[in-house]
Image (cartoon, rainbow, N blue to C red):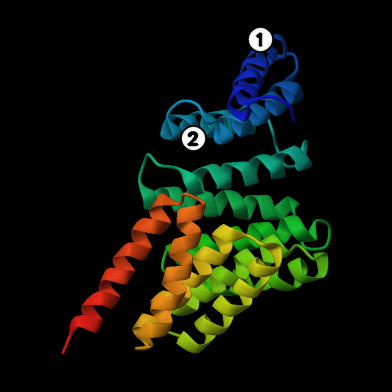
Amino acid sequence: INGDKADNLELAIEAYQLALSVYTKPDFPKDWASTQNNLGIAYFYRINGDKADNLELAIEAYQLALSVLTKPDFPQIWGMNQYNLGLAYSNRILGNSAENLEKAIASYQNASEFYTRDDFPEDWADVQRNIGKLLVQQGRWYDGLSRLEQSLPIYSQAENLEALADSVYHIARTHHLIMNLDKARMNYRDALRIYNHLNNQPGIAICKTGLGMLMISIGFIDDARQELTQAYEICHTIKDKQGIDNIQQLLQVINKIKAKP
């Protein structure tokens, strides 16, 4: 795609809004709904403007599309729209966070009625992975683990290594949360191997950060420092400010532990 991404998204939004003046809801309901869905996608990924406002505009467009789309009449675009709505609610900044999680899960559950394991295995796995992450956020760790683990054979068979690594990382993180430390360490290392193979620097950094935190909790302080220092260097290279801040706090914890007599 040529041109600046931010500019291209602005042009797309303008084009969809113009299309909506032609494809009216009464005369062209399917085209109108498809355009609302595309408008929602453009707002979701929009770079310009306030992120929170863009997400609200995306949700509004998706919900307008669903005022026309029904599963019996338009199953494919209905399923896609439900998935997109789940993605928007799970990233939503405004509103009650617990309610946003519930709405995201409900939308993904709806999407899974179209994206079945038999007909759309990778899409089904994406839905399970996303629901799994949200369930973990809700503190429903074992339900979340189950969903995440269900995605693994699909991604392995499809050789979708990015998605596989993401699932394995979140399985590691969940085991870490519930203090299954051996399983957490094993899965962090498995995810790290995949991210190294892909040369995915952000993925390598989050796995090393997770391993560093785990090593602190089991008293392997020198190992923790090594993992966190490597993660810090990567975050500095890729300009991940949040990652840098998190790691600096963990390194301060290590320094306090080391300073104790």
Look at the picture and state if 204 lies above or below 100: below
- In this view, the residue in front, 136 or 247, is 247
Residue 128 % position (x, y): 64, 62
Q: Which comes before the other along the chain, label 1 or label 2?
A: 1
Residue 69 % position (x, y): 69, 33
- In this view, the residue in front, 125 or 113, is 125
Quadrant containing the C terminus is bottom left
What residue would you read off at disc 2? 55
Looking at the rendered structure, the secondary structure element under dot 2 is: helix
Mark 1 neighbour class, 10 Å CA radius: few under 14, some 14 to 19, many 20 or more: few
At x 61%, y 64%, the residue is: 166
Look at the picture and state if 203 lies above or below 44: below
Is residue 141 in sight in this rendering? no
Q: Nearer the viewer, mark 1 or mark 2?
A: 2
Which amino acid type corresponds to the residue marked 2 in the rendered image? Leu
At x 70%, y 40%, the residue is: 78
Looking at the rendered structure, the secondary structure element under dot 1 is: helix
Is residue 16 in sight in this rendering? yes
Residue 210 % position (x, y): 46, 72
Which amino acid type corresponds to the residue marked 1 in the rendered image? Ser
Q: Is residue 2 left or right of residue 210?
A: right
Q: Is residue 183 left or right of residue 160?
A: left
The quarter holding residue 198 reads bottom right
Q: Give the label on residue 21, or none.
A: 1
Quadrant containing the N terminus is top right
